[in-house]
Every structure is written in structure tokens, then in C-alpha cells.
Amino acid sequence: MKLINGLGVTLLLGTAVWTGTTLQANAKTLTWHAGTPKSLRKTWYHNGAGDNKAYITYSATKSTGNLLQATNAKATYAKLPGYGLKKLKYQALGHHVYRLSGIQYSPKGSTVQFDGQRLTYQVKVVSKHQLHFYKGYAKYVTKPAFKVVALKQLTR
């Protein structure tokens, strides 16, 4: 019995070491592509509880996002000026998971803490209507559960 258990542990550890080595080798050989994956290129909304709402828009070369501001109208939120990443590039990690990297920028007239620095994060395209971030607000969808208006409409 000890021989069988010992053999099982040896096989398990051997497999873990081989798999870990393979994953490390693959991570080093992943290719960076310019821009964003086509499946990301749209506006995504976080339908958080209460006023905890946000958006992120991906274009071919950059991302822009921010929190949404509650308005006086019921279930209506305004898009605040967006922060984001420019000069985006990505790695396809498999199973619709992407590592994105870009230079952080701010909207005109404001500055973020890491303005001009490279930021890298991972996302998964769960479906054409759902996106999962591995840090921060996790779930984003293409159809918000609320009305979105431009900030300009509020200042008139």
C-alpha cells in the first residue's frame, strides 16, 4: 500500500513540475499583439449595487473608463470623463483570456496617480455580452440595467 501511495505522490509531483515548466515556457513565448482583441471593442458596464456603477470602452488602440455619476432622474447615470490606457497591446492566454498592457492617461485637466506609466491586467471575454476582470469590479456587461446619458446633457 505504501508503494502505491508513494508512486501516486511521485506521479502527481512529477506532473505538477512538468505542467509548471510547460506553463512557464509558454508564458515566455506568448506573442504581444498591437491594439485590443476585436471581441473587446465596445462599451461595457458594471451594474453594481446602489450608485456603484462604472463603464469601460475599448477601441482598437485604447481603453477609456470611469465611474458613472447618479443623476436626479430615476435609474439614470452620466458618464464622467474617462481615464484609461493608450498604446494598448495584448497577449492571448487561451480560453478567451487576454493580458492587456498600455500607458495610463487622464482626461484633460486632471491627472491620475500613475499617469504615463505602463499598466497590465487580465480580462476574460465570457460571452459577447459579458466580460470578467480579474481585479477590481469583476463583471461587466454590454447592456446596462440603467439609463446612461452624456455628462453634457446634465450641465444644460
Image (cartoon, helix red, strand yellow):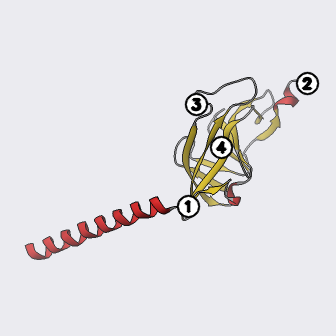
Residue reaching furthest to the left: 2
CA separation in Å, label 1 and label 3:
26 Å
Q: Is residue 10 left or right of residue 91?
A: left
- Mark 1 / mark 4, whichever is N-terminal: 1
Amino acid residing under circle 1: Thr
In this rendering, the label closer to the viewer, 3 or 2: 3
Between the C-alphas of marks 4 and 2, the distance is 27 Å
The tag earlier along the polypeptide, 2 or 1, is: 1
Distance of label 3 from label 2 (alpha carbons): 33 Å
Give yes or no for contact between labels 1 and 4 (Cβ–Cβ under 8 Å): no
Residue that badge 1 annotates:
31
Where residue 69 sits, quadrant-wise, is top right
Res. 156 mark: 2
User: Is residue 1 in view from this perspective?
Assistant: no
Give the residue type that dot 2 points to: Arg
**Total numbered badges shown on the rendered structure:** 4
Q: Are marks 1 and 3 in contact (CB under 8 Å)?
A: no
Q: Could you tell me which residue is drawn at 87 percent across and 30 percent down?
A: 153
Label 1, secondary structure: give it.
loop
> Camera-side residue: 11 or 104?
104
Label located before the other in sequence (3 or 2): 3
Q: Which residue is mark 3?
A: 114
> In the structure shown, which secondary structural element does the residue marked by tag 3 occupy?
loop
Q: CA distance from mark 2 to mark 1?
A: 48 Å
Camera-side residue of 59 and 1? 59
Position of the C terminus by quadrant: top right
Identify which residue is drawn at 34% across, 64% down: 21
Amino acid of disc 4: His
Q: Is residue 148 above or below residue 23?
A: above
